């Protein structure tokens, strides 16, 4: 068994499943988001769920929105029980602006304000470009890129334009060196990174900050499972990452908390890469990823 990394004792708590943490050590002031209201797309699972939990632990009320209302409702019950804050679950498909508008109206009716929007909803899978259908590429662009634009525009026009606010887009580092089997998600996230800068410029005068957090491989998530994180973990691939491990969801939530809150009041148009230095050193091995992908296809048959 590998020796425990000396610094792992300093990592924030996390649990692998979509459950709340059994203990939590504050790094920021516990009232950093007191009585703020945040909308988190895709907040019922993975990184979005942990962002919701950490925000609520800092005094925020939350709206989580995605397609699967049953899972969202379950998630909101867990979040309320663990934090004592309010959490509203609403059905949203970020590809359909009218569902976002309805969620925004529901948020304003319930909470009377919106301070933060986290664009976290995304769809992804490994697939080489030649096997990717036109519709598959379009689907990922529609969820990741258009979904981020749709939610940002609806929230800005309905509330942020007159009250200010903070938007954090959850990106990825896939596009930085053309990650194999990821042309769809890498292209979508690269567009989002540009969108962060464009909207920061246009909406700054209204008191709106727009920033990005770009995670690396984060354990206990659907993205990790789909993109081969478990296999990378067992085969020692993470030793090539400067920090020699995958990240955890709470680490991502802390980065987002920084960007969303007054802790970063003079930061806009920025991208915080939170990947342990992964993109700088990790292999971009087309042959190995093709093997991994085709083995998965055989398994799924
Ligand atoms: C190739 C695929 C595919 C796959 C779907 N498609 N899955 N193609 N490989 N594994 C194709 C379908 O055949 C179809 O094309 C088109 O994509 C749309 O598929 P639908 O199932 O109709 O789409 P939809 O129901 O809208 O679902 C969207 C989805 C799905 C993205 C395909 O997987 C989803 O809902 N994902 C949400 C959860 C998720 O992906 N979480 C991980 C995020 S992680 P045709 O031509 O047949 O019509 C992440 C990590 C980033 O983003 C970075 C990590 C390092
Ligand atoms: P996840 O749990 O699958 O999160 C994605 C969320 O998006 C789900 O809750 C899903 O909920 C929602 N969603 C998908 N399509 C949607 C749509 N059309 N409308 C509304 N909501 C939709 O995966 P995750 O790994 O935690 O990923 C979270 C974010 O981190 C994503 O932006 C991802 O790209 C990014 N990221 C993750 C990793 C990683 O290692 N996990 C690395 C880099 C970046 P429904 O199914 O209910 O709609």
Image (cartoon, rainbow, N blue to C red):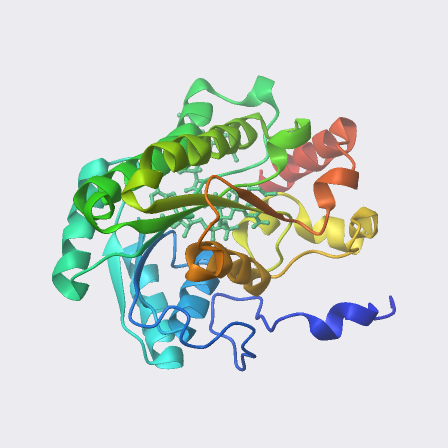
Q: Does residue 91 appear left or right of residue 276 in this picture?
A: left
Residue positioned 37% across, 34% down in the render: 199
Give the image location of residue 83, x and y in percent: 38, 79
Residue positioned 37% across, 68% down in the render: 33
Give the image location of residue 287, x and y in percent: 77, 27
Q: Quadrant of the C terminus?
A: top right
From the viewer's side, name the closer residue of 162 and 42: 162
Q: Is residue 62 visible?
A: no
Determine whether 57 is above or below 244 in the image: below
From the viewer's side, name the closer residue of 65 and 104: 104
From the viewer's side, name the closer residue of 251 and 202: 202
Give the image location of residue 236, x and y in percent: 82, 52
Q: Quadrant of the N terminus?
A: bottom right
Q: Is residue 183 visible?
A: yes
From the viewer's side, name the closer residue of 293 and 259: 259
The picture quadrant where one finds residue 125 is top right
């Amino acid at each position: 068994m590998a020796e425990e990394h000396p610094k792992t004792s300093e990592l924030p708590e996390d649990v692998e499943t979509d459950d709340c943490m059994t203990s939590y050590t504050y790094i920021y002031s516990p009232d950093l988001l007191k009585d703020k209201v945040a909308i988190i797309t895709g907040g019922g699972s993975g990184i979005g769920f942990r962002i919701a939990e950490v925000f609520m632990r800092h005094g925020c009320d939350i709206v989580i929105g995605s397609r699967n209302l049953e899972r969202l409702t379950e998630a909101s019950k867990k979040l309320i029980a663990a934090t004592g804050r309010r959490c509203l679950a609403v059905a949203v498909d970020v590809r359909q602006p009218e569902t976002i508008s309805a969620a925004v109206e529901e948020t304003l009716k319930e909470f009377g304000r919106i301070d933060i929007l986290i664009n976290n909803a995304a769809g992804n899978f490994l697939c080489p470009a030649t096997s990717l259908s036109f519709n598959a590429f379009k689907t990922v662009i529609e969820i990741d890129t258009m979904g981020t634009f749709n939610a940002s525009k609806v929230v800005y026009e309905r509330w942020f334009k007159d009250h200010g606010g903070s938007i954090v887009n959850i990106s990825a580092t896939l596009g930085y060196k053309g990650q194999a089997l990821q042309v769809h998600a890498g292209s979508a996230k690269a567009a989002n990174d540009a969108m962060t800068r464009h909207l920061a410029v246009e909406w700054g005068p209204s008191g709106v900050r727009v920033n990005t957090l770009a995670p690396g491989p984060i354990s206990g998530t659907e993205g990790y499972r789909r993109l081969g994180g478990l296999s990378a973990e067992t085969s020692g691939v993470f030793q090539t990452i400067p920090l020699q491990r995958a990240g955890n969801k709470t680490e991502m939530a802390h980065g987002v908390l920084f960007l969303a809150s007054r802790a970063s009041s003079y930061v806009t148009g920025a991208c915080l890469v939170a990947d342990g230095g992964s993109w700088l050193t990790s292999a971009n091995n087309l042959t190995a990823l093709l093997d991994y992908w085709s083995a998965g296809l055989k398994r799924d048959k």
